[in-house]
Image (cartoon, helix red, strand yellow):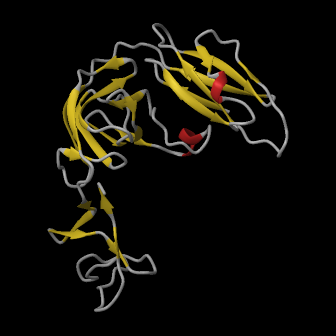
């Protein structure tokens, strides 16, 4: 098992599952990996660790927990041009006010060297959402955001909890850091998820059987119109 981690350093959690009452130990001999002994071990069902910034080439280190080895592969500093952030906004409404826990879109240049969304391999060490994707990390006020999608001109992230007011947003692309761009964090800014069909914008809604609400003559694909008195589910960002 293993995990890729960014060049600029950070922290993480390694979940450990063992039979009830089974004691286990943890250790590392990698000098750039530190284990938080106050929040690790059987009572926590996890090993919480941090890793130093990597000033050189990519490197690997290991953590041993419950008799198993877990590998951390850390990106190295590269000659990638520095990312440039043009805007940070709500992923659906394009509002510049965004909400902790909601999805946000970051637009700019040199944001990533790859184009992809997360996949199963990015969840190799537990169920926590990945904060590192193809060498890219994003921070809001210094807190890492879950990264769902990366491309050279757009990144889609989940805004971290525990922030408010105006916070600096930074993108790190394989060790190259952007200048901070300010984002306005508010308690709520609801926006409906939507789709475009026939040149018009429609709110995403589903029937109780989870099929799409829509005019089948326009949308196709098994969509059906809403009926009077029917209960529908709408999908909203920024609550």
Farthest residue in the left direction?
A: 199
Q: Please tell me how many numbered marks the rendered image carries.
A: 0
The answer to which quarter of the image holds residue 225 is: bottom left
Q: Does residue 222 appear to the left or right of 72 in the view shown?
A: left
Check the image and name the residue furthest to the bottom. 228
The quadrant of the image that shows the N terminus is top right
Tell me the quarter of the picture where residue 106 sits. top left
- Seen at 14% across and 68% down, the residue is 199
Q: Quarter of the image holding residue 215?
A: bottom left
Q: Quadrant of the C terminus?
A: bottom left
Where's residue 127, x and y in %?
A: 58, 45
Residue 192, position in %: x, y?
A: 25, 63
Depicted 178 relative to depicted 147: above or below: above
State the image coordinates of residue 226 (x, y, percent, origin top left): 30, 85
| Residue 165 left/right relative to 61 | left
Rendered position, 201 above or below 27: below
Image: 91 above or below 4:
below
């Amino acid at each position: 098992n293993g995990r890729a981690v960014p060049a600029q350093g950070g922290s993480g959690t390694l979940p450990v599952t063992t039979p009830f009452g089974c004691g286990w130990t943890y250790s590392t001999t990698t000098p750039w990996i530190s284990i938080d002994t106050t929040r690790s071990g059987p009572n926590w069902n996890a090993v919480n660790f941090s890793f130093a910034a990597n000033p050189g080439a990519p490197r690997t280190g290991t953590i041993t927990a419950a008799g198993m080895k877990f590998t951390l592969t850390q990106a190295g500093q590269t000659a990638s041009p520095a990312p440039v952030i043009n805007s940070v906004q709500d992923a659906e409404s394009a509002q510049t006010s965004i909400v902790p826990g909601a999805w946000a879109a970051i637009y700019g240049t040199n944001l990533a060297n790859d184009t992809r969304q997360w996949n199963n391999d990015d969840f190799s060490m537990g169920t926590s959402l990945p904060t590192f994707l193809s060498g890219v990390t994003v921070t809001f006020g210094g807190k890492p955001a879950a990264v769902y999608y990366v491309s050279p001109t757009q990144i889609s992230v989940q805004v971290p909890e525990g922030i408010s007011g105006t916070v600096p947003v930074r993108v790190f692309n394989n060790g190259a850091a952007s200048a901070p761009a300010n984002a306005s964090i508010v308690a709520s800014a609801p926006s409906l998820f939507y789709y475009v069909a026939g040149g018009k914008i429609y709110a995403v809604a589903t029937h109780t059987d989870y099929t799409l609400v829509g005019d089948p003559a326009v949308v196709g694909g098994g969509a059906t119109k809403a009926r009077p008195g029917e209960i529908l589910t709408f999908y909203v960002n920024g609550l």
